[in-house]
Amino acid sequence: LLTNANIHTDTLFPRSAANKHAYASTTLPLDTKSIAGFVALERCLVNIRDMRSLPEGVPFSFNESLDLATGYRTVSTLTVPILGQEDRILGVLQLINSQPEGVPEPFTETMETRVQLLAAQAGSAIERGTMAREFILRMLNMTALRDPHETGPHVQRVGSYAAEIYHRWAERRGVDIDRLRYEKSRIRLAAMLHDVGKVGIEDRILKKPGKLEPEEFETMKRHCVLGAEIFTGAVTEVDRLAREVALHHHQKWNGTGYTGTDAAPMRGEEIPLSARITAVADVYDALCSRRSYKEAWAPDQAVAVLRQDAGSHFDPEIVDCFMEVHDVIEAIRARYPDEA
């Protein structure tokens, strides 16, 4: 199966309106009945001049349901495989409607060559990204062995929430779209690692089923600095951002937070943006998740806490950004549910 197709069509989904669709749990059978499936199986390029006039004898057909549902009109398509090492299929890149003059027209041979080159570069980038992501997930699995709260779905949700909150924040400021997407991917990974320092906290505290005593809580605070120490001597930008998030995600807007060190707490915009975003993402998910000492809260209850604590615990603008993408947040919760 080809799963979780990521769609970016500016004329159909302007700005960030498509973001919630990126988290839809969708599958496409890997067979020759669709162009994407055919391209993936045959590892070949398919260039269609008009989707409503397919060449005779092809095994695939045009599914017009999306066009009918949205009012969009698909005419020309160019579909190429994204391949990795040993000709392994990593995905399919499909472009819809070449419109150099604003009217759909066929994709040219020059476009075919350029898109194949782009697909090759994308394949290399995907493989590098997959290796980095797998390494991070193994670190998180190690944390989950110690802390029952640090589940795979929890960290996936927090990372995705943080990425989408940043996306809205950057849109507000007119950040260049390429820069936005680059920073968004970094923040997603760094936010997933926010509590990795809990591997250094002893079990009697980490797994205690109830409220911590004051001295136990002081020990628990050290997970921030322990997480930051994991990334000491960071050599990549993701490592540096992960250190920043791990150390500062319990800072508070009014200056009453902590890092687990003797340093005075930060306040307001002194707190790194990545940490201010992760704080909102982490608290919302913790409130909406079941714990040994509480049941999961309804989303509207958790939202009420964010609104109430905006300006004290949380950056008010980050809370506003969260509210503006709440439909995407709920799509993420549906995409990464807790295991039974």
Image: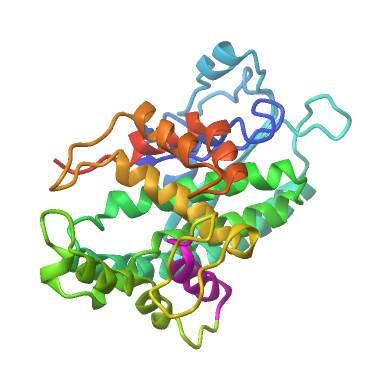
Q: Is residue 102 visible?
A: yes
Q: Is residue 28 visible?
A: no
Q: Is residue 274 magenta?
A: no
Q: Position of residue 284 (x, y in %)?
A: 39, 42
Q: Position of residue 175 (x, y in %)?
A: 75, 50
Residue drawn 43% across the image and 77% down it = 228
Above or below residue 137? Residue 5 is above
In this orientation, which residue lies closer to the viewer: 4 or 74? 4
Residue drawn 27% across the image and 39% down it = 337
Residue drawn 42% across the image and 32% down it = 303
Q: Position of residue 64 (x, y in %)?
A: 54, 16
**Left or right: 177, with 322 as reference point:** right
Dominant secondary structure, magenta: helix
Above or below residue 127? Residue 92 is above
Q: How many marks?
A: 0
Q: Is residue 250 magenta?
A: yes
Q: Position of residue 72 (x, y in %)?
A: 65, 18
Above or below residue 247? Residue 183 is above
Q: Which residues are magenta?
A: 236-251
Q: Quadrant of the N terminus?
A: top left
In this orientation, which residue lies closer to the viewer: 255 or 322? 255
Residue drawn 63% across the image and 65% down it = 270
Q: Quadrant of the C terminus?
A: top left
Residue that protrudes farthest toward the right in the picture? 101
Q: How is the image coloured?
A: rainbow
